[in-house]
Image: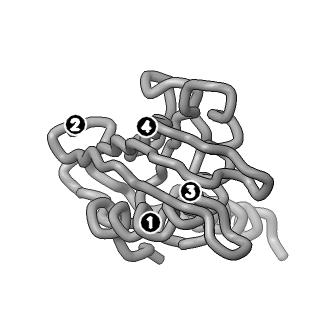
Amino acid sequence: MNRPLSLLLACGLIAVLGACASGPQVTEQEAYNGQAAVGIVRPPGAQGAMIQRRLLSGLDASGAFAGLYPLSSPHQSTEVEIVIEPVVVEAQSGSRGFERLLLQVHAYRKHDRGDAFNTRYRGRASGNRDALDEILRPLERDLKRRFGAKPVY
């Protein structure tokens, strides 16, 4: 093959690969309507880290969000769109975990606190499930209703 033709083909290939690698352009006016990333703030208190972990794993199993991330503060610098701030109002521990639990949950869009909810969830242990397991189902349902969206592929 002659040298100018090889150079021309190489430049063409580089241009095509560069265009493919850049991905779609999203303007500021274009709104993202897919699933949101969620941050869960660690509740204060001795059981806060454990509650945060259980909320992260329980809500992640629902598949309703793009991702769930632990936060140490609601003001932490992060790319999450939705912030969940749980607070333990009452807790009674037992041999299986929480026998009773009253959890106050404040959830909002990071850049629009007007789109928020503030709800108390009461759970009680039954069978092989503790009180937090009972709270996860209604909490997941409420979060999906308020902030859920279908995945964008």
Name the quarter where the N terminus is drawn.
Answer: bottom right
Q: Earlier in the sequence, mark 4 or mark 3?
A: 3
**Residue of label 3:** 67
User: Given this view, does label 1 or label 2 mark the residue nearer the observer?
Assistant: 1
Q: Position of residue 3 (x, y in %)?
A: 80, 64
Residue drawn at the location 45% of the way across and 47% of the way down: 102
**Residue of label 2:** 113
> Please, which residue is most extreme toward the left here?
114
Q: Earlier in the sequence, mark 3 or mark 1?
A: 3
Identify the mark at residue 140; answer none if there is no mark: 1
Residue type marked 2: Arg
Give yes or no for contact between labels 1 and 2 (Cβ–Cβ under 8 Å). Answer: no
Residue type marked 4: Glu
- Most foreground residue, 110 or 130: 130
Q: Say left or right for 145 vs 75.
A: left
Q: Say left or right for 132 vs 38.
A: right
Counting every numbered tag in the picture gives: 4
Residue type marked 3: Gly
Distance in Å between CA atoms under marks 4 and 2 = 12 Å
